[in-house]
Amino acid sequence: MHREFAATAKVLARTAAQKGKNVPIFLADGEDRAIAENCPTPPTPLTGRANPEEAWKKETHRTLMATCPSWSVDWLSHLMGMSGPGDGLRSVDTPMEEIESIFDSVFAPIAGEPVHELDPSLVSNLVQLYGSDEDILDAYYVFIHPYHPILPPPERLPVYNRPLSQRPEFRPSSPLSLAISALLVLIPHPNATDPLRAEYVKLRRDFAHSFARDALYAVRLDSSLLNPSNNVLNVDRAQFHPKLPLTLEGILALNLLSVYEYAQRGNLCTMSDRANEALTSAMELSLHESLDEDEYAKARRRTWWMTYMVACQAAIVNSMPATFDLFDPHFTTPFPEGWKVPVEAQQTLLETVVFMTDLEQTKDSGQSEPGIRERMLSLDSQIGSLLFQCRDAPSASKIDPTRVEFPEVVASKAMITIAEIRLHTARIKAHRFCAFQDIPGFHQRLYEFGPSPTVSESETQPRSPPDNGAETTLPLAPSSSSTLRLPFSSHESSKICFHGALNIVTLLNNLPFPNPTNEIPLNSPPYLSQTTRVEIPRSILTFACCGMQSGYVMLMLCLKARSLRERRMEASNFADTPSLTALLNELHQSLGLLVKCLSNCAVAFEALSGMRDSRRTDQIAQAMEQEFLR
């Protein structure tokens, strides 16, 4: 019954298997692994990590090994890694010697040679290049703006995707048009016959790397030409967008280059560098305290708050505090219309990451921290309040497939959906320690199945303390006699994580597809062309890792259900389903949707291909088969 479930679940389990191959991949949680070879590993506040394989040998885990079959122990030791950094994305680097001459060979026209159509035999190598900045701007509104709206609304409508099918005479030169081109060229050309062909993927990768490199150079050039006395950029070029000052183009280019490093190259270190440089540049231009009302007000506000959120994202994926005060009273720039809740959702996710780091340190230190309990309650309440605001937001209605929505309307609705995704991810992070404290998995720490040795069997059931309902009482470090009191039972937190995971999958799949031809109604799903069954990729650039959190939770719940069943406990004791079979069916469907969504994004962005890579160990495959075919 669950054969297809096994296949989809193994796709996610493959990610954990990469740990044994030292493949640099990451997820929005945990330490910075310094993926780039030329980036030194930064110091981490969390030290003394246990070796997972050695931990299995310790006396305290013999109960678990006796409870689970040998294959479950092997699988679990890999599955643990799915909550760490690098899970879901892989590092993608291109040797410079392979791409040094790519622009010369493509862009340099031959003197006296007329422009001509490409030979049909070369159609399979077409990439998305454009004939003007205006066409690049239109393509931005089609593919990027719905999920990452850094620019003001479009000045001309409708917008279409018009990539060239001939030798280009135009070459982008501004930092922003180059940075946008680095993302657009990763999306397969609509006339490409086999968009997943390895040679074609490499071609797109090389173009993107060239665009990104030139964009960074253009940012540096703009910076050198900026007059610090009046913040005027001394360059002779047209504005990329009529309502965007030239001085902001470099900041937005760095914003997109940070996203590029994250989604395409899987490079956390460089992603953080670009995001923090953009934030610093924005503050040097006083964008954080911009109160002027003029034709550029919208552009300044969007530039500041989107740069702020990308800098937050850089901290989130590294599981580190932000490099700036999240609630600095000097940040007085008004929110763009409808952005208050999305910004607060990002702040809350980062606060939750910091809470998880503190919780881990508290357990490691063996010192009971009375403030942990109150912080968890406060975060849970804050997340719940913001989720209600998301559902009540005016833009939260679904996209109408029977008419073409303006790009700004689509972006407004998508921002609320993305805010909900981040909030459910925050809730999972806040609760997963409580939910899975009886299962190994967080930051390479292992804990026994079942009740803690210091808690009797009767005390493992939810109970009602005087003030705040059921609690979880956990021992701290092995040498400590103190306990860590959390305000939720494992039962409650497991259910919260379960519903959060399902909500993330639903919300991800509700995000709109790009509509490059303004088709009415838009086919669902829309394909790149009539000659391929590959769906148009959605640019879920900064929050695909939330899907991996969802997948991790669902697989851990499967393991927990299996463990409870093998210990002759009723599986429905912890999940809102009538039986273990019903639970697995629900997870089967959700995992299938999750894999489909992440695979769609990975069509364009290679770092995400770690989520659908076919490589996996036979041991993992056998474990997953046994897990879901029983």
Image: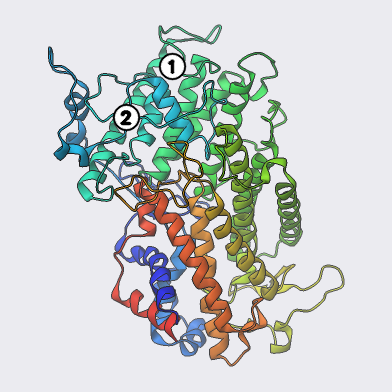
In percent of width and height, residue 291 lies at 70, 19
Q: CA distance from mark 2 to mark 1?
A: 18 Å
Q: Which residue is mark 1?
A: 223
Q: Amino acid at mark 1?
A: Ser
- Toward the viewer: 59 or 237? 237
Q: Quadrant of residue 114?
A: top left
Residue shown at 44%/6% (left/top)?
A: 234
> Helix, strand or loop at disc 1?
helix
Q: Callout 2 environment at 10 Å: few (<14), some (14 to 19), or many (20+)?
A: many
Q: Earlier in the sequence, mark 2 or mark 1?
A: 2
Q: Callout 1 environment at 10 Å: few (<14), some (14 to 19), or many (20+)?
A: some
In percent of width and height, residue 296 lies at 60, 16
Q: Is residue 509 visible?
A: yes
Q: Is residue 329 left or right of residue 501?
A: right
Q: Amino acid at mark 2?
A: Phe
Q: Quadrant of residue 267?
A: top left
Examine the rendered structure and indicate whether residue 358 appears above or below residue 230.
below
* Tag nearer the camera, 2 or 1: 2
In percent of width and height, residue 525 lies at 45, 52
Image quadrant holding the N terminus, namely bottom left
Examine the rendered structure and indicate whether residue 354 appears above or below residue 434.
above
- Toward the viewer: 224 or 452? 224
- Toward the viewer: 625 or 155? 155
Q: Which mark is residue 373?
A: none
Q: Which residue is mark 2?
A: 211
